[in-house]
Image (cartoon, helix red, strand yellow):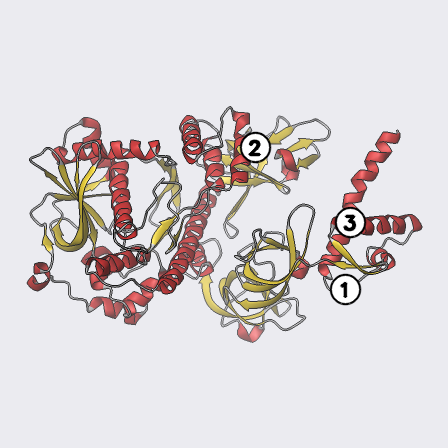
Amino acid sequence: MGRRKKSKNRNQAPGLTSLIMRLFSKNPQVSLNYKQVSTRLSLEGPADRKRVQKALHKLKSSGDLVEIQPGKYRLKSIKTYITGRVDMTRSGTAYIISEETEKDVFINHGNMNQALHNDIVKVFIFARKRDGKLYGEIVEVLERAHDVFVGQLQIQNNTAFLIPDNHRIAVDFFVPMNSLKGAEHGDKVTVKLKEWPKGAKNPVGEVDRILGKPGENDTEIHAILAEYNLPYDFPDEVEADAENLAVEIPDSEIKKRKDLRDVLTFTIDPHDAKDFDDALSFEKLENGNIRLGVHIADVSHYVKPGTLLDREAYDRGTSVYLVDRVVPMLPEILSNNVCSLRPNEDKLTFSSIFELDESGKVHSVWFGRTVTRSDQRFAYEEAQEVIEKGEGPLDHAILPLHRIAQNLRKKRVKNGALIFDKEEVKFNLDDEGTPNSVYFKRSKEANQLIEEFMLLANRKVAEFVGKRKGESKPKTFVYRIHDSPDPEKLQTLGEFVQQFGYQVNLGSHKVISSSLNKMLKEVVGKKEENMIEQLTLRSMSKAVYSTENIGHYGLAFDHYSHFTSPIRRYPDVMVHRLLQTYLDQGKSADADDYEQKCKHCSDRERVATEAERDSIKFMQVKYMQGQEDKEWKGYISGVTEYGIFVTIEANHCEGLVRTHDMGDDFFVYEDGNFRYRGTQKGTVYQLGDEILVKVKHADLMKKQLDLKVVTAES
């Protein structure tokens, strides 16, 4: 009995210290004694006040609180102020991501002070807690990430509010009745933030655009575009600028370039592609080697710095590929016509030309501007058929290039490259854009053929600039960099996958990558495949653009850039311009200017990825609508304090099972074990478990699938 009582007291103490720390965190510059603390926590009894006194002494000893005078305590500050970006959570709390701190700073919802998701803010940091986390309070919003917000309009009793779609926007927007601009109750709209009066609970806005009725395909896709501030179309003046470009290639321009129109050239792309920005050429040399040309659309010839086209392309940063449409970086006349390497048309290109032997060894390389003419367009499926059958159109080129590509791939893996052979979720859509079936695509040898030669060109371009002999300092360049993973994340991954019989060996880069590749290969076709691939990806750092070259961990390249997709990526346009400048013996570009551009392009890429992910979620939820009576096999792909995430095997749709939908039991969340345990029947739900579920609700507006567990009783 005595032991149980002692254990009970131990369990109570952390709860009290947590309450006290929360109180001081909300009042970082206020000094309080034990009586004031007790009163604010509604702990008025003598025994409770004694516990408060003990807890205050303990927090002083641990360094969380400082005793500024006998009996009076205040939160200890380790640094006065930092600047960072707000990363909101569903619960209304946030983390501040800043280059000024090693760790993210936690912000309680009471210390947000009118900041919203992705805002740039000034933060006052409190003491570091025993858990190693940093805690702070936002004291000023320096820069709003957005001034337009998407959501559903709710009008009641002559009062209107916007309920934001984004669960990371934790407040509703008050919309005065004279600012509705014709919008009605229930409409999906965008609202422009006008003001947020000091002390007011809600910001004030006005309707900016009526998107339509919730749940309709166009309404929800336009809502995704608006949410991420992605443009619907090009401004008229930008379209006019594109229309005025000279389409015909004059002889004077051809004379400036290497003319490769007589060399066998072809493209390999998805069957529904319209913008062909890369082509390969093939020549067999007398010495038995192969001359391979990697030819890239010369977008920089048409899009000049400082023009309307260039400013628009830079602002967009990248093309965005939603499930049912593309938001291009360049107007269609450029992306699908002038710059697209369509068959039987002369095109201006920027080329990397290699002499290779069959092992993939590079004997020579040349970079420069060219004019090319594609002889044939292959879809990936058509090129794959040639590879599998060993014969077919242009087999004398496709087959030897396939062998070289596979040798290059083997070398990459041997050098420590990571291979993620991930399935892509695709949808067949009807004429109205509604998904009627789901299918999966996995990279095959034809995809790898193109991938390996694009990687080769990107790597060699970066090496050409970054490893030039006779230069004390490399010239400014745009690199694609990928930092090594956090050892703690790898350790966590390794501990988790052990329960499935896999190993992650920590050590050198090659040891880690070898064990990860082995695991990723073994997991293919298993029920836990998608989950383990996702967890492995999350353990990796994010690839970004930078002028500071640290190499690319995932590809195991010391030098890497993006040269091969200028139709859809602005960094590639910058690379083309810099490469030509250095080929012409020009001086090094301004590093600070290009570093700023790199950060902008990395941000735009992140936004595009999030928008693409949201469009997939929307289509998955839409696909599952009306299928409430069907039972689905799935596996638990996530465990949180508010429920379990289940991925359905048949279509990779992921939904949430809340605790009250897990079955006829009371379930307790066990944080450290990533599982729930039933207190009455002992049923356990943990990561990776197979499970049978039904759709409870498919919420198109939230892009959220609510599921319930199918039990014997149901």
Amino acid residing under circle 2: Leu
Identify which residue, 510 or 649, lies in the foreground. Answer: 510
Q: Is residue 146 above or below residue 443?
A: below
Q: Earlier in the sequence, mark 1 or mark 2?
A: 1
Identify which residue, 241 or 620, lies in the foreground. Answer: 241
Amino acid residing under circle 1: Val
Q: Which residue is mark 2?
A: 687
Q: Secondary structure at mark 1?
A: loop
Amino acid residing under circle 3: Ser
Identify which residue, 534 or 11, lies in the foreground. Answer: 11
Q: Are marks 1 and 2 in contact (CB under 8 Å)?
A: no
Residue 4: x, y in percent?
84, 31
Q: Which residue is mark 3?
A: 61
Residue 29: x, y in percent?
73, 64
Q: Which mark is residue 30?
A: 1
Q: Secondary structure at mark 3?
A: helix
